[in-house]
Image: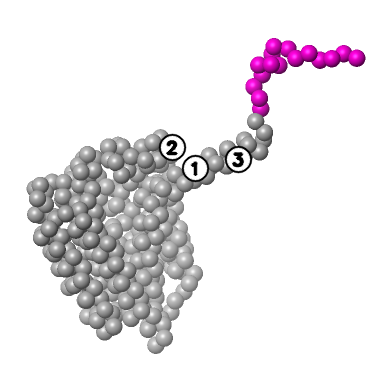
Amino acid sequence: MSIAVPTVAHLHSPIRRPRTAQRRDELDTMRSRLADYAELCKPRIAMTALVTVAVGFLLGAAPDLKVELLLHTLVGAGVVAAGGSALNHWLERRADAKMHRTAKRPLVTGRLSALEALAFGLTLGLVGIVYLYLTLPSPAAAIAAGLTFALYVGVYTPLKRVTVWNTVVGAIPGALPPVIGWCGATGGMAAPGWALFGILFVWQLPHFFAIAWMHRADYKRGGMKMLPVVDSPDGRATGIATAGTALLLVFVTAVPFFLDAAGWIYLAGSLPMALWFLARCVRFARDRTDRGARTVLRGSLVYLLAVMTLFIADGIVPRYFQ
């Protein structure tokens, strides 16, 4: 009987890992990449936009809701929003590398390549627009979504490094989601849909002024010309702009009532909310601190949630029970 003696080659051969461990590593890598792609889509922003898409659709469709069309509108708009966010990551990858709050994004760290993000964003944007065109009776929603995509990616994002007016320009695509919803339901646009657009357009201004104030040092490092960055050190213009746009929001909040898009319950509930939010903005205008800006930011979110809830409860639901 011969006994096999291990050779030097055997002693130094690499130890193979079990297949289960290799598969676990592959799954972990896949999960990590999927999480990075999900981060490119900015899901929290997309979900907020989809809520307003749904509100616009429900208002336009009332009292004849077609669930299939609502789902098609939400899917298409969501895919377009995800594509726009991915391209925003791609366009701002160099600026993101200079800012603390964005330094761990997938393109900055190299977890995803710029080419991957570009291809991903363009594909999603195109697929979402084509999906809306093919699944809805009218091309109006696809046109509105395409306009939103083009303004957000091609105009607003580059303007952030060019002019302080970028926030006003960016509020346009940010306010178009309910227009997409209305178009998905009706195949066109009408005054109530534009009223929702107006509320979201004006609301975004104090909301983003507060965010820009809190992150003004970061935005400056990234070369972003937000109002608090180009403002004087005491932030007087930022305070005036925040309070002024909040005052405008009080008037815009009442517009759906006068267009018969909502009733007295909406008006009685939304106007006090708008005045409450205005009071927070005025306090910030007088005492321009990070704490005050945070109060404005939180107040803006509470205002939007309250007004959308009131709008649904008093402007939309009753129409389905007439």
- Marks 2 and 1, how far apart at CA: 9 Å
Q: Position of residue 233 (x, y in %)?
A: 10, 47
Query: 215 or 304, which is in the foreground?
Result: 215
Quadrant in the rendering for residue 278? bottom left
Q: Position of residue 304 (x, y in %)?
A: 29, 67
- Marks 1 and 3, how far apart at CA: 12 Å
Query: 85 or 294, which is in the foreground?
Result: 294
Q: Quadrant of the C terminus?
A: bottom left
Callout 2 touching callout 1 (CB < 8 Å): yes
Q: What residue is disc 1 on?
A: 32
Precedes in sequence: disc 2 or disc 1: 1
Could you tell me which secondary element the residue under label 1 belongs to?
helix
What type is the residue that disc 1 sits on? Ser
Could you tell me which secondary element the residue under label 3 belongs to?
helix
Query: Magenta segment, which residues?
Result: 1-16
Callout 2 touching callout 3 (CB < 8 Å): no
Q: Residue at x 52, y 44 (%)?
A: 31
Q: What residue is disc 3 on?
A: 24
Q: Residue at x 35, y 56 (%)?
A: 45
Q: What residue is disc 2 on?
A: 111
The answer to whether residue 194 shows anywhere in this view is no
Majority secondary structure in the magenta region: loop
What type is the residue that disc 2 sits on? Arg
Q: Is 169 placed left or right of 32 in the picture?
A: left
Frontmost of labels 2 and 3 is: 3
